[in-house]
Amino acid sequence: MSRPLLPLKAGAIAFTLLWIAWMMWWSGSFSSVNLIILMLCGAAVGYFWYRAVRWQFERMGMLPKDDSSS
């Protein structure tokens, strides 16, 4: 893991966990199927949140541009 992206990745993980917890609480259903669906959706939401924030930070010049990743 590259050092400049470490806080961003940790933030994405925290965002994902908080999103899943909030959706579980909001739905009111604690079944295993609901948990699995929300975990899959949470992983997608966390990934897209990470990509969007990383793109924005690179655009603002807050992160070094990395040509090796896509």
Image: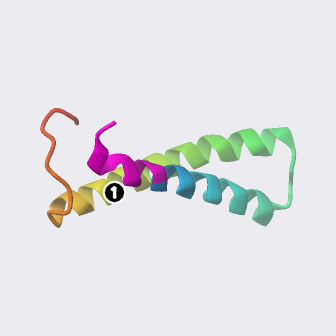
Q: Position of residue 62 (x, y in %)?
A: 20, 63
Instruction: Say which residue appears at 68% left-offset and 47% top-offset.
Output: 38
Instruction: Say which residue appears at 34% left-offset and 59% top-offset.
Output: 53
**SS of the residue at dot 1?**
helix
Residue 12 falls inside the magenta stretch? no
Which residue is nearer to you in this view: 34 or 63?
A: 63
Instruction: Say which residue appears at 69% left-offset and 42% top-offset.
Output: 37
Instruction: Say which residue appears at 47% left-offset and 50% top-offset.
Output: 10
Determine the image quadrant of residue 22.
Answer: bottom right
User: Image check: 63 left or right of 25?
Assistant: left
How many discs appear?
1
Q: Quadrant of the C terminus?
A: top left
Which residue is nearer to you in this view: 7 or 17?
A: 7
Outermost residue, top side: 68
Which residue is nearer to you in this view: 37 or 43?
A: 43
Specify the amino acid type for callout 1: Ala
* 41 shown above or below 1: below
Magenta residues span: 1-10
Instruction: Tell me the chief SS of the magenta region.
Output: helix
Q: Position of residue 28 (x, y in %)?
A: 85, 61
* 65 shown above or below 62: above
Determine the image quadrant of residue 55.
Answer: bottom left
Local crowd size for mark 1, using a 10 Å CA cut-off: few (<14), some (14–19), many (≥20): few
In the picture of the structure, the residue carrying the numbered disc 1 is 52
Q: How is the image coloured?
A: rainbow
Q: Quadrant of the N terminus?
A: top left
User: Image check: 39 left or right of 68?
Assistant: right
User: Image check: 47 left or right of 14?
Assistant: left
Outermost residue, front side: 3
